[in-house]
Amino acid sequence: MTDEEMLMCEQAAANAQAEAAYAELLARGEDTDEAVIDLMEAFTLPTRAEGFVIDGDGQANWALKIIARAEANKRRRSATIQRESMRWEEWQQKGNAADDATIERMTGLLRPYWDQLRAEGAIPKGRKSYQLPNGRLATRTREVKYLRNEAAVIVWAEPLGLIEIEKRLKWAELKRRLQPERNETGAGVIDITTGEYVAGLMVDQPSAEVFEAKADLA
């Protein structure tokens, strides 16, 4: 068996085992965080390709097939994370709702006691807090909250100079006028329209040919 065939067999075996294990988890309702994380590790494909050289269309097509499988695994992991995140967010929301109700109920019970302490003079005039071993009771002045029709208020406020204008670059338009002085990191940038150096700009990542292998995803 060639290295190529051996690697393909290992890939297929790893995928089959992980998919079967995941199906069992779902069937038993045991898709916990720990189990899913373990399964993600099982989905990780072996990468024993050192010394292997692609020198023909058949081998190149095989490599693209492996890439497609890896991309499929990434999508599967993302779907799993999304599903688990939604489940945990739902759990958090339910728990928070119950605790918020408890906090609101206890706060409602404490307010009459605060009024009683004030009436009895236990809280001096002008004082806004009362200390207890497990915390404190307190009052604060709530600010006015306004309901705004933004467009209408802007029309009214503009003549008074109460409008804030944010300055932003027209980057898409500006970029068409730019040319690096040299195609290397740190090089200055020239405005090709005026021939001037552009202040505040330098090359961060030079232009380069980037190779990609795009697999046809199922």
Image (tube, rainbow, N blue to C red):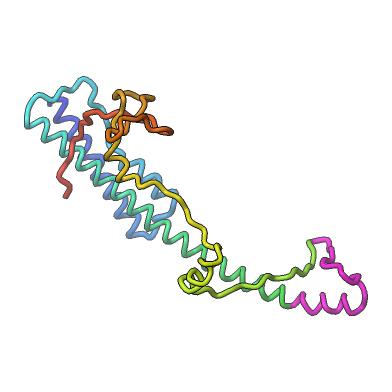
Which quadrant of the rendered structure holds the N terminus?
A: top left
Which residue is at a point 58% across and 71% down the rendered structure image?
Answer: 98
- In the image, is 162 to the left or to the right of 7? right
Q: Is residue 129 above or below residue 211?
A: below
Magenta includes 115?
yes
Q: Position of residue 136 (x, y in %)?
A: 80, 64
Residue range highlighted in magenta: 109-134
- In the image, is 132 to the left or to the right of 36? right
Identify the residue at the far top of this view: 51
Residue 17, image quadrant: top left
Identify the residue at the far left of this view: 57
Foreground residue among 199 and 139: 199
Which residue is at a point 30% across and 45% down the rendered structure image?
Answer: 173
Q: Position of residue 201 (x, y in %)?
A: 40, 33
- In the image, is 211 to the left or to the right of 90? left
Q: Position of residue 40 (x, y in %)?
A: 35, 44
Which residue is at a point 28% across and 49% down the rendered structure image?
Answer: 75
Marks counted in the figure total 0
Q: Position of residue 88 (x, y in %)?
A: 47, 59
Foreground residue among 38 and 213: 213
